[in-house]
Image (tube, rainbow, N blue to C red):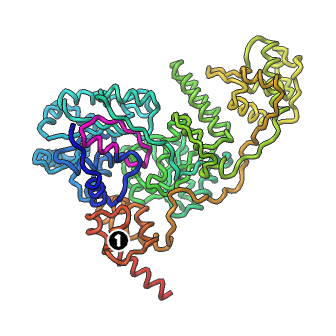
């Protein structure tokens, strides 16, 4: 085993190259194992610094690090960022001309690069694999490694072929990285990539800088416009369930004077690429997109993610909300919710032909509905889905913790609902759905109620004090509390659980939660990641950053992230020495940009004094 480098030398390299003086959680351990030649599996949340885990070792040693990435836009983005920090990196993909590819190959053979980004299908092309041993490859980093598992949310069959790299580069260690994976997917990654005695690292899934909110859906297009108008300088993503919705919402935003564009799989690939490029370069503030947009869009200053429609599952929702606040500055995640969306999603599920797929999809949707309707801490619920316990409740970063929902004595309502369930089962010997139970409780005279004789049971009509909508909320909460069970079959039925039977006998009081009420949005709390600075100066620095980025033909965050700009606006350095102390300022960026930004800060100070 290779001897790992001294900690001080890696920290010095980190500051010199990327401008940071400390590692994020688990980065140092992962980097140490990589430098020692270990196979490593790392699950770090979005914004957790996965890329540094292979970039810093690549800079620290001689030879080439091969980075397998499924996304062309991500390759260029990362290579641009590395080159801006003075690191020799390149990529090979279908966007290059034959002449450009040949020139980059010559550079690889001459040992000019430390990192090569490549798509799996290009890597596995006949003839290319045979040339790999000639390139002095020291490590293979597999980014977005969840793509190898059919249980992952973005399965890509070409990832399955990566294990054959072992035959061509038998002694080269692997680093597999992902931002989101259930235990089953993690096991798949280790097995299918044939990782050898891997060191496995799983960071917390908690994103403390994100605030999670559920908002009752009511005139949703106008809700989105109103919300974004309250954030006049912020970039964000609006996720929609259909292509038609992405276009309609984008038009509504543009009509309100908000620069927005739609993005979906039905658009020409050239249009999609241009749309993504405009978003990355801050030429358009808002993207209205289907889930076709997102993976690999490493824009760090996305300040909000709005879900216009109910997501299909919690894993996808977590992944999509994770695109906000990648830079560690606060971001907001808003889900517009109505029970009608849940019904619509169930309809889509019924169109699936495979029975197992239907059952899994129904179960996942039910978990998503529970999340949306629950009065529990959103953060705690999300983390529990990934097997993580979060006990720091109230979290201070979700609607249920910031503004706890009103509770009421639901003992009588619960007794009526569960008793009705018991009597229905007793009378008919078969289970019924939630809506049928509510019809019995509210005294419906429907043909089905009469045909089955359910207007004759003792609980018929005993719940007229609540509306059907109120009973639906009560029923769903009793399901969440485990007092009833709900099947995941095509015709979903509700049954009385053992816990429900025991509670009925115990006569213990029960508190239930009022449904989410539509109300004015509360002020955002101060949460982790806030950097207080002069907002006018911050806007001046943003303008300068965009001008420099346009000259260099790169996205603005390649020059400096919003974090660095906010520290600049807060500290207002007067010299290069002070400028060098800022996070995100390495030697190359200090040399290239410090004088421009110091001059802008000085001009702003002088103008402020004159005024």
Q: In x, y percent, where is residue 160?
A: 31, 27
Q: Residue furthest top?
A: 429
**With respect to residue 397, does 204 lie above or below?**
above
Q: In x, y percent, where is residue 592?
A: 27, 68
In the rendered structure, the answer to whether residue 163 lies left or right of residue 329 reads: left
**With respect to residue 303, does 573 lie above or below?**
below
Q: Residue at x 88, y 26 (%)?
A: 461
Reading the image, the residue beneath label 1 is 579
Residue 93 visible at all:
no
Residue 46 visible at all:
yes
Query: For this rendering, which residue is in front, 408 or 57?
Result: 57
**Mark 1, secondary structure of its residue:** helix
Query: For this rendering, which residue is in front, 565 or 43?
Result: 43
In the rendered structure, the answer to whether residue 46 lies left or right of residue 428 reads: left
Q: Residue furthest bottom?
A: 610
Residue 411 covered by magenta stretch? no
**Magenta span:** 29-49
Q: Residue at x 66, y 52 (%)?
A: 402
Q: Residue at x 32, y 49 (%)?
A: 52
Q: Quadrant of residue 137?
A: top left
**With respect to residue 59, does 363 lie above or below?**
above
Q: In x, y percent, where is residue 224?
A: 60, 53
In the rendered structure, the answer to whether residue 177 lies left or right of residue 209 reads: left
Q: In x, y percent, where is residue 515?
A: 73, 42
Task: Give the class, few, some or many, for how many residues have Cα within 10 Å of label 1's Cα (few <14, many ≥20).
Answer: many
Query: For this rendering, which residue is in front, 214 or 587?
Result: 587
């Amino acid at each position: 085993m290779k001897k790992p480098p001294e900690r001080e030398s890696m920290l010095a390299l980190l500051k010199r190259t990327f401008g940071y003086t400390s590692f994020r959680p688990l980065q140092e351990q992962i980097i140490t194992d990589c430098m020692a030649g270990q196979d490593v599996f790392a699950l770090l949340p979005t914004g957790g610094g996965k890329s540094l885990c292979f970039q810093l070792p690549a800079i620290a040693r001689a030879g080439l690090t091969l980075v397998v990435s499924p996304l062309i836009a991500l390759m260029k983005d990362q290579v641009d960022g590395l080159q801006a920090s003075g690191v020799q990196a390149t990529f090979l993909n279908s966007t290059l001309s034959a002449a450009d590819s040949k020139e980059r190959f010559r550079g690889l053979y001459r040992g000019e690069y430390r990192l090569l980004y490549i798509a799996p299908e290009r890597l596995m092309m006949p003839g290319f694999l045979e040339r790999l041993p000639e390139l002095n490859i020291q490590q293979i980093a597999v980014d977005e490694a969840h793509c190898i598992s059919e249980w992952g949310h973005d399965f890509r069959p070409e990832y399955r072929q990566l294990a054959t790299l072992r035959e061509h580069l038998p002694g080269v260690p692997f680093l597999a990285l992902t931002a989101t994976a259930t235990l089953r997917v993690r096991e798949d990654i280790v097995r299918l990539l044939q990782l050898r005695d891997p060191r496995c690292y799983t960071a917390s899934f908690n994103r403390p800088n994100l605030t999670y909110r559920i908002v009752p859906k009511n005139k949703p297009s106008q809700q989105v416009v109103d919300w974004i108008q309250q954030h006049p300088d912020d970039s964000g993503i609006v996720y929609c369930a259909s292509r038609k919705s992405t276009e309609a919402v984008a038009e509504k935003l543009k009509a309100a004077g908000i620069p927005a564009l739609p993005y979906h799989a039905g658009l020409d690939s050239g249009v999609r690429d241009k749309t993504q490029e405009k978003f990355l370069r801050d030429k358009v503030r808002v993207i209205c997109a289907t889930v076709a947009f997102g993976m690999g869009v490493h824009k760090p200053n996305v300040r909000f993610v709005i879900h216009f429609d109910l997501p299909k599952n919690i894993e996808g929702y977590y992944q999509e909300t994770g695109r906000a606040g990648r830079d560690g500055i606060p971001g907001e995640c808003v889900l517009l919710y109505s029970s009608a969306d849940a019904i619509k999603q169930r309809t889509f599920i019924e169109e699936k032909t495979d029975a197992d797929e239907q059952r899994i999809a129904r179960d996942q949707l039910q978990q998503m509905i529970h999340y949306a309707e629950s009065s529990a801490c959103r953060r705690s619920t999300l983390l529990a889905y990934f097997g993580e316990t979060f006990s720091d409740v109230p979290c201070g970063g979700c609607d249920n913790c910031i503004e706890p929902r009103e509770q009421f004595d639901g003992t009588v309502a619960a007794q009526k609902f569960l008793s009705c369930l018991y009597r229905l089962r007793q009378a008919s010997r078969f289970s019924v759905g939630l809506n049928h139970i509510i019809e019995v409780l509210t005294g419906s005279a429907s043909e089905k109620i009469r045909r089955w004789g359910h207007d004759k049971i003792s609980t018929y009509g005993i719940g007229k004090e609540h509306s059907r909508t109120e009973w639906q909320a009560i029923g769903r909460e009793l399901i969440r509390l485990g007092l009833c069970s709900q099947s995941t079959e095509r015709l979903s039925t509700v049954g009385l659980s053992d816990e429900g039977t025991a509670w009925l006998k115990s006569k213990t009081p029960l508190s239930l939660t009022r449904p989410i009420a539509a109300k004015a949005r509360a002020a955002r709390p101060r949460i982790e990641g806030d950097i207080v600075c002069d907002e006018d100066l911050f806007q001046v620095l943003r303008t300068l950053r965009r001008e420099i980025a346009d000259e260099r033909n790169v996205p603005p965050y390649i020059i400096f992230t919003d974090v660095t700009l906010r520290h600049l606006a807060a500290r207002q350095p007067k010299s290069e020495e002070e400028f060098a102390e800022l996070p995100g300022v390495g030697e190359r960026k200090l040399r290239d940009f410090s004088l421009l930004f110091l001059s802008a800060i000085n001009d702003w100070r002088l103008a402020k004094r004159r005024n």
